Image (cartoon, rainbow, N blue to C red):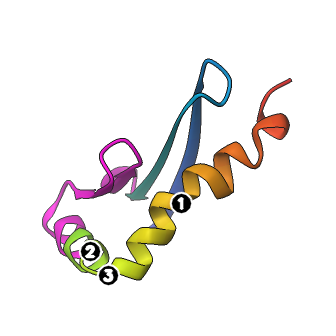
Amino acid sequence: VLQEMAKSECHFINGTEEVRFVDRYFYNRLQFLMFDSDVGHHVGFIPYGEKVARAWNSDPDFMERRRAEVDTVCRHNYKVFTP
């Protein structure tokens, strides 16, 4: 059985003052690609992930939306994520 999975995480430090958004991609339990808002671009961990990272990082509109997810996903939903 082949399985692909994506996992998004929001890390809040001191409320919404410092927020980190991490988006990770897996194939058969192996992480092949990651986006970290602190780094600001995608990082590939295997040859396929490196190829996808290069393609996604070279698209300025896509990268602008990815970097904005700290606000649109994490900060926007802060009250949902915290008790």
User: In screen coordinates, is 48 left or right of 2?
Assistant: left
Q: CA distance from mark 3 to mark 2?
A: 11 Å
Q: CA distance from mark 2 to mark 1?
A: 20 Å
Residue 53: image x %, image y %? 25, 68
Q: Which mark is residue 52?
A: 2
Q: Residues within 10 Å of mark 3 (few under 14, many from 20)?
A: few
Regarding residue 3, the answer to whether it shows in the image is no
- Secondary structure, mark 2, is helix
Please state which amino acid type lies under the numbered disc 2.
Val
Quarter in which the C terminus is drawn: top right
Q: Earlier in the sequence, mark 1 or mark 3?
A: 3
- Secondary structure, mark 1, is helix
- Secondary structure, mark 3, is loop
Disc 1 marks which residue?
A: 68
Residue drawn at x 84%, y 39% is: 80
Is residue 40 located in the magenta-colored stretch of the structure? yes
Residue drawn at x 59%, y 39% is: 10
Please state which amino acid type lies under the numbered disc 1.
Ala
Question: The magenta stretch spans which residues?
Answer: 27-52
| Mark in the foreground, 3 or 2 | 3
Disc 3 marks which residue?
A: 59
Q: Earlier in the sequence, mark 2 or mark 1?
A: 2
Residue drawn at x 17%, y 66% is: 50
Q: CA distance from mark 1 to mark 3?
A: 14 Å
Q: Earlier in the sequence, mark 3 or mark 2?
A: 2
Residue 22: image x %, image y %? 47, 46
